[in-house]
Structure formats: structure tokens, C-alpha cells
Image (cartoon, grey):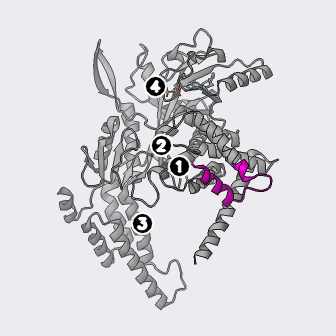
Amino acid sequence: GAEERGARAGRRPRVTVDSSKAKTSLEALKISLRQLRWREFPFGRRLPCDIYWHGVSFHDNYIFSGQVNKFPGMTEMVRKITLSRAVRTMQDLFPIEYNFYPRSWILPEEFPLFVTEVRMMKESDPSWKPTFIVKPDGGCQGDGIYLIKDPSDIRLAGSLQSRPAVVQEYICKPLLVDKLKFDIRLYVLLKSLEPLEIYIAKDGLSRFCTEPYQEPTLKNLHQVFMHLTNYSLNIHSGNFIHSDSVNTGSKRTFSSILCRLSSRGADVKKVWSDIISLVIKTIIALTPELKVYYQSDIPAGKPGPTCFQILGFDILLMNNLKPMLLEVNANPSMRIEHEQELSPGVFENVPSPVDEEVKVAVIRDTLRLVDPQKKKRKDIQALLGKWQHPCRSSSGMKDKQHKHHSLKLSLKLKFYLKLGLSQTSEHVSETKEELLDGGSAEGLEYDTSKNAEAGLPSLCLKQVFPKYAKQFNYLRLVDRVAALFIRFLGVKGTTKLGPTGFRTFIRNCKLSNSNFSMASVDILYIDITRRWNSMGIDHKESGMCLQAFVEAFFCLAQKKYKSLPLHEQVASLIDFCEYQLAALDEKRLLCGR
Ligand code: ADP
């Protein structure tokens, strides 16, 4: 239809977006698509779309191509318990680097540990008068949250099957603005998992409490408008002020706060760089398990979509300006209107300019970054660059070689065009013609980018990874452990390792010896696996989950490299295993020949 006519008329095909599952992000998405002049399919489409925009989660069995704005497993990964566990593993390895997350315990299973640890800390420092915050797992919007002064105040409700929760140290000295506590919602784009690519939105939202803050006492512990910054709670306070500009009211832009801070003489650059490192480190804690989910839902070598995802980071600034991570949201609200009570019981949705300003920019620029046509253009240009200047890379090439080289390039290019742009044949011939006419690479770029990007503001998303990869790559140890785990999973589609897989791992990496028999290997497997499975996270499959494997791996590392600090023990064992497996692969390759 329209698309074909457009293509015949010489226009490029527009990017297609399926918005039928966008839910509450629909309004902001629609505005973004209009600005980009992309094509929306509000009821879905029989043909494949370039992008599928989901409001809730990845799951959809009928997507075999294109891109989806959710990763499989992300919702599970950022639940309070899973996130706390993942961060704790990193804290075990790198306690100082990961001190941006409050000390946390998982309930009910770690209740005894919580009691003893708190007692010990109090004994060693009698002046320590802590407060704790209890948050039910899977809760949101402040639901079920309460503060306590003493471990014995936890409402385990007497029942054995009490609701799983996280209890953590309450941050008593938050930064205040206008005497009020506030937190920051920052938008982070995980553009790709492999290779890791992370972007951060330059502006976010600050959400304010509606009652002046006081440090927690037994008297004020229950005052949610003083202690909890959730918008959904504070909206019900008589003091809530809907913001019509971006630097007043109960919800403001984060940049307006930073302006205030900088006028008070704060080092705002340092605040930002601390936030960036918090975000990168948190994502590094999440990637190992995400990779396990990814290979299980989208096995390598089978047709499937690629994924990207906008995450909502909730961050609290302490009064010394140190950012602390509160939680990560897999489905940050993208609503750009709020409910207003016109008269008792009569509600109306009215536009919220603060939300619109920040959220539309985040969605639009996410789309610009994942733009499938931009990627194609880039790839073509890389090839065109070589086609036009074939000697660039090998300047001393002789004439005959040169011809041969050009021929190879042109074949490669033709092949690429067939593959990459097969969706619209017109587009292919058009690009071919440009090529044969000697159209320059620069010309092509201008022609294709002119209509898409013209008139749009500069990107609000800033790349932080791989940009700062050098500073953070040493933290990615569990990623490498996960790669070993995935290698031995064997059958695609699973997330748990069976006993045979574990034995193969030990054998292939030559980890068993006279001190550590295969019988002890089996015992290690059974012990750790049984404990993890009894914690009742995921009963669907039997076997060893990634975290259990990580625990076993840490045990093995401690056994093998006794006196080193844990992260060095683990790094040494990873090096050792990777070396053994590379040697094995090489041997197999030689035998195969
Ligand atoms: P929810 O998913 O229910 O919003 P959060 O973990 O975001 O749960 O906690 C809700 C609110 O409680 C946060 O917005 C913050 O204001 C406050 N809060 C949470 N954890 C802490 C903490 N450790 N110290 C101080 N305040 C906290």
C-alpha cells in the first residue's frame, strides 16, 4: 500500500512499530513516533514490524525478527530479592565498589542472620541506633513497606509462609531540599547485552515527600509522607503540589535540583560521575543472569528478535551527596498525565508537562538509537568506504591485487544488500543504482539521514558503556562465570545445570584431583543445589541455577587459591578454566581435521 507507493516515489521505507501492547506508555510512544515520522501499527500487523513496543514484559511467542523493548527475565531480575542477591554477590567480591546499596537481608530465610548481625554490630558500636525498612518482594509504589527500629518488630505474621521480603538499613540522613526528602528517577537504556551498551538520560525526575523530614524516631516511623517518596503515596497527601513548571512542586526535573545544588556550591559533576558509576555497576551485577535468560528464550542460531530496554533507576542522595541505589524498575511508568480529582469521586486525566518533557524525550531518543535503518546505513557506509577507497587499508597494494580486492568488495556489498535490505526490493535497487552511478558515501548519508533527524533536538541519552568500559571491566567477573555456566548448560532452552553438566565442567576444566574426587564434586553439587532450590525461587526446573553455580565456583576458587582475596581467587580460577577450555577446543579442532 502506502509503503510501496512511497518506496516507488523514491522515499525510504519508514520504520514500522507495533504499539498494540504498549499499555500505559502508549501516549508518550505516539508522540515520539509522530516526531520521528515513523509508522505506527496500533493494532499490530500481519507482516513483521521493525520494532515491538511492549508495556509489560518480553513475552510474546510470535516475534521472530526485529527488536523488542524488553529483555526476557528482566522483571524477575529486578525484583527486590533477586536484585539484593545479585548485588550481594558483587559486594562479596568488591565490597568498596558496591557500597552504594544499603546492607540488606532476605526474609524469611535470613531472619536469624539479620538478628545476629545486627546484635553484633550494636555490640561493637553501642552508639549505632539503626532504623530498618521492610519491603515485600514484588511490591511497588510503597505497598506494604514499613520502618522498624529493632529486628523483633518484623511482622513475620506468625505463619511459616510469610511473604518474602527484603529488610535493609534505612538511610537516615538523606539530602533535603526545602526541608523535604526526595528521590531521583533516572532512565537508563540497556541497548544491548552482548556487547554491553548502556546509555543514561541526561535528565530525570525528582519525587518529593509532602511532609518535612525528621530523622526516624518511634513516634514518626509510620509517617509515610515524611519517609517514603513514592509518587503514588504522596499524591494522596493534602500537601501534594502538581508541578506546572519543572522546578517547583512535588515532582520536578532532576536538572532543576542540580541547579539548586550547584548554586549552593555543590560539586555537581562529581554527583553525576558517582551516579554513572552506580548505574554501570548495577547493570554489571544484573548481566550474568540476564544472559542465562536470554540464551534460554532466544537461543543463538534460531530466528528471534533482539532486545533493548529502558530501566527506571530509583536513587537517593545522602546529605553528603553520595548516591544510593534504592531499586531498579523494569517497567518505569511512562505515563504523561496524572489523575486529578475535580470534585469528590470525579477524576480526570490531565496532562503533566514535567512527565511529558522527560519521558517523551527518553522514548524518542531510545528509538533513534535503535533505529534499524541507521544501523543498515552504518554498515553500508563501512562497506562503501572500502569500496571507494580500497587502498586505504593496504596502501601498498598492487594493481592486480587492487582489482581483485574491489571485486571481492562489490560481491560482498551485493550480498549484503540482498541480505540486509531484502524487505523492500525497491530500496535495494535504489541503493544499487546510487552505487553504480558512483554516488558518494557522503551523499548517501546525507540523503537518508536528512528527513529522519532534521529538526530533532540533540540526543538526551548519553553513552556511558562502552565509553567508560576500561574503568569497569575488571568488575565483570561473574559475567565470565556465567559464560562457563552457559557453555555447560548443553540443551538450549534451559536455565539450570544438571549433575552431568556440572561433572563435565569439572572434568573439562581439570578441577578434580586426588584432593578433590569426583565423589566430592557430586556432594558439592547436591549440597548447593538443594539449598538454592529449597529457597523456593523457581520450582519450574530442577538443577543448579546460575547463583548456585556461582556459589560453587567461589567455593572451588577458595579451595584452589587459598590465601588470596576472594576476587583474586575467583579471577584466577576463571583464567584457569578459560585456558583449559581453549586448549580443549583447539585439540578438538585439530582432531576434527
Ligand atoms: P517501591 O517499589 O514500593 O517503591 P522502594 O524500594 O522504591 O519500593 O521504596 C519506597 C520508598 O521508600 C523509596 O522511594 C524511598 O523513599 C524509601 N526508601 C526505600 N528504601 C530506603 C532506604 N534504604 N533508606 C531510606 N529510604 C528508603
Where residue 501 appears, x then y in whole percent? 60, 54
Whichever of labels 2 and 1 marks the residue nearer the N terminus, that label is 2
Q: Which residue is mark 1?
A: 292
Whichever of labels 1 and 3 marks the residue nearer the N terminus, that label is 1
Three-letter amino acid code of the residue under disc 1: Val
The part of the chain drawn in magenta is: 497-521
Q: Quadrant of ligand 1?
A: top right
Q: Residues within 10 Å of mark 3 (few under 14, many from 20)?
A: some
Q: Residues within 10 Å of mark 1 (few under 14, many from 20)?
A: many
Q: Which residue is mark 4?
A: 141
Q: Is residue 432 above or below residue 230?
A: below
Q: CA distance from mark 3 to mark 4?
A: 44 Å
Where residue 263 appears, x then y in whole percent? 56, 31
Foreground label between 3 and 2 = 2
Q: Is residue 533 left or right of residue 355?
A: right
Tell me if label 2 and label 1 are in contact, CB under 8 Å. yes
Whichever of labels 1 and 4 marks the residue nearer the N terminus, that label is 4
Foreground label between 2 and 4 = 2
Whichever of labels 2 and 4 marks the residue nearer the N terminus, that label is 2
Q: Quadrant of residue 125?
A: top right
